[in-house]
Amino acid sequence: MRLRSVVRFLSQALTVGLAAAIVVLLLLPDSDLKTAVVEIREAASPPPVSEANGRSRGHGAGPVSYADAVAKAAAAVVNVHTSKVVTRSSNPLFDDPIFRRFFGDDPGTSRRHGLQTNLGSGVVISPQGYLLTNLHVIDKADEIRVALEDGRTVGAAVVGTDPETDLAVLKVDLQDLPSISLGDSENLRVGDVVLAIGNPFGVGQTVTMGIVSATGRNDLGINTFENFIQTDAAINPGNSGGALINPYGQLVGINTAIFSRSGGYQGIGFAIPVSLAKGVMRQIIEQGHVSRGWLGIEIQEVTPALAESFGLAGRRGIIVAGVLQGGPANRAGVLPGDVILAIDEKAVESARDALDAITERPPGSTLWLNVVRGGTPQEIRVQVAERPALEER
């Protein structure tokens, strides 16, 4: 009897529980019974990374080696050796400017001659024998010799130089001269892999790898016209004038400068983009010098305080701080205090924008300046002249 009572009790409890569950399912809204869902975003499988030689190691894998890219470019990267004769007094005391002030430049002492040498790098751009390097590598040299990767050595002549970009074009007379292919520096992105080839410290041709750290670097105080590619590929003294290449062995820059507190590699190097170097080289070869537009004005950028005082309502532009007497801008009627807002209808955001817009115009052409003078907008037509050489200014 007792067992039968227990079974009956359990059966009744189970029946009541099932009935209650059915009531709950019928009465409660569906939303109260849904299970919480965590939303996540999963990236699709990365596509195979193409290698410079066309092979692929699979998903997400980088090139096995950059040897093919280096092999394409290295033969066109040369060592540049320069030498010049320097004259010094037999006694260092006579080189002191204060001493010369009292005793003159020629105190009757004997002079001695010495040979000063320099090492750098260069890049063969054309099988015709044209090379690109930095001006500071060959500046004031009495003799320039170029050593190729295949062991040949030859004298080089200076075709022309451009101090405002620190570029120089050399010419050598050799048969079967290897040349490099030019790449696209305009579409370089931060994070792109690059390799630097040159002759650091004179140890011989060396290749280092890094990435593009930044593009369009300017206002560094290195050159007048700056649009540097910044990279962390190791660049040291002797690399100047060498090649910065992409993983396909194409030239994207001319290694030019380093930022260093010790004189050696610190992870910040700068290269002139090939787009700029190519234009300079063509002008030097075709016309013997680089021709740029010039207006004869001194400019400064509009600060927020100046914008308010000139009533520009937050607009950007540049202020004409000075006008050269008899220069193109002076003849056109430009006055100190004019605020240039646009050049040929293109807004001017900085002094760098204005400099680029003016110098890109060929001498003899005309441009229009949109200026504000005393709160009144004006348009001024100016005929562009040729920018004087540095030593003429």
Image (cartoon, rainbow, N blue to C red):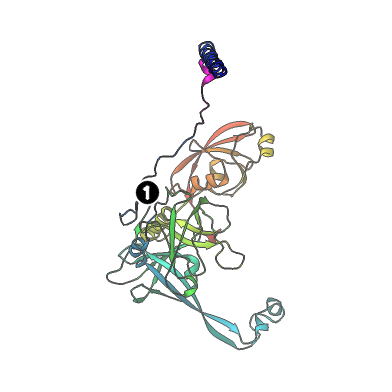
> Which quadrant, please, contains the N terminus?
top right
Q: Which residues are magenta?
A: 30-39
Q: Identify which residue is drawn at 27% across, 69% down.
A: 176
The kind of residue tagged 1 is His
Label 1 neighbour load within 10 Å: few <14, some 14-19, many 20+: few
Q: Is residue 225 found left or right of 183 in the rendered image?
A: right
Above or below, 73 against 55 in this view is below
Magenta: main secondary structure: loop
> Which quadrant, please, contains the C terminus?
bottom right
Q: Identify which residue is drawn at 49% across, 45% down.
A: 357
Which residue lies under the disc numbered 1?
Answer: 59
Foreground residue among 277 and 368: 277
Q: Is residue 116 found left or right of 46 in the rendered image?
A: right
Q: Identify which residue is drawn at 53% across, 52% down.
A: 217
Q: Position of residue 29 (x, y in %)?
A: 53, 14
Q: Secondary structure at mark 1?
A: loop
Q: Residue furthest left?
A: 176
Q: Is residue 227 visible?
A: no
Q: Position of residue 134 (x, y in %)?
A: 47, 64
Does the magenta portion include 33?
yes
Q: Is residue 49 visible?
A: yes
Q: Position of residue 224 (x, y in %)?
A: 54, 55
Query: Which image quadrant for residue 246?
Result: bottom left
Q: Position of residue 62 (x, y in %)?
A: 39, 54
